[in-house]
Amino acid sequence: MPQLGGNTTRASSGMNAAATEVQRKHHIKDTVASFYHDTFVGGGEQNNPELLKYFTENGADAIDWLMKHGIVLDDLTITGGMSTMRTHRPSSMAPIGGYLVTELLKLADKLSCQSLRKCTWTGY
Ligand SMILES: Cc1cc2nc3c(=O)[nH]c(=O)nc-3n(C[C@H](O)[C@H](O)[C@H](O)COP(=O)(O)OP(=O)(O)OC[C@H]3O[C@@H](n4cnc5c(N)ncnc54)[C@H](O)[C@@H]3O)c2cc1C
């Protein structure tokens, strides 16, 4: 049976982002440049630099956007190739992917979207 979520439902550890409010609260010093460097090295220096720049520069905004909508990733851990704790996850330690998809679906319902395919996320 088809279901929403794709590989995202399988993600288990957390969502990487640098220089976030959550890190500041946990007294973790981090920079976008360090996030870029670690990810570039982890990717065998084969990463698309433009995409990686966008990803690393906008990670903190993504965490904030989720937080603003009640999807709270307030705990931190460290995952492969990272030089500091920048993997954001819920403090319940629920697997990140299932948590995100479930909460985003609830948000879509709240915003009266009949289907995610009909949702316009821009501007929320
Ligand atoms: C076991 C596991 C653990 C992981 N853990 C983590 C982790 O802790 N942190 C992390 O950041 N990443 C993790 N990842 C990687 C992460 O899950 C993926 O990078 C991420 O889910 C990719 O998101 P996406 O939106 O690009 O793709 P997806 O979430 O896969 O979404 C793509 C969607 O498009 C649909 N689709 C495909 N083709 C078509 C088509 N032709 N028409 C219509 N729909 C189509 C698919 O069915 C799917 O629903 C993990 C991956 C796995 C497998």
Image: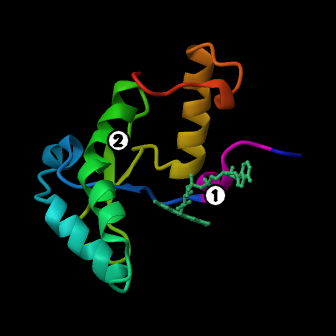
Whether 4 is drawn above or below 104: the answer is below
Viewer-proximal residue among 20 and 37: 37
> Does the residue at mark 1 contact the one at mark 2 (Cβ under 8 Å)?
no
Q: Is residue 14 left or right of residue 35?
A: right
Labelled disc at residue 7? 1
Residue 47: image quadrant is bottom left
Residue 111: image quadrant is top right
Q: Does mark 1's beta carbon lie closer than 8 Å to ligand 1?
A: yes
* Element carrying mark 2: helix
Whether 108 is drawn above or below 98: the answer is above
Residue 104: image quadrant is top right
Residue 29 % position (x, y)? 10, 58
- Taking the spot 17% from the left edge, 51% from the top edge, the residue there is 19
Q: Amino acid at mark 2?
A: Ala
Can residue 17 be found in the magenta stretch?
no
Say which quadrant the C terminus sits in. top left
- Taking the spot 70% from the left edge, 26% from the top edge, the residue there is 115
CA separation, marks 1 and 2?
18 Å
Residue bearing mark 2: 62
Secondary structure, magenta segment, majority class: helix
- Taking the spot 54% from the left edge, 59% from the top edge, the residue there is 12
Q: Is residue 29 left or right of residue 93?
A: left
Looking at the image, can residue 84 be seen?
Answer: no
Circle 2 packing at 10 Å, graded few (<14), some (14-19), many (20+), is some
What range of the chain is rendered magenta? Answer: 3-10
Q: Does mark 2's beta carbon lie closer than 8 Å to ligand 1?
A: no
* Colouring convention used in this rendered image of the protein: rainbow
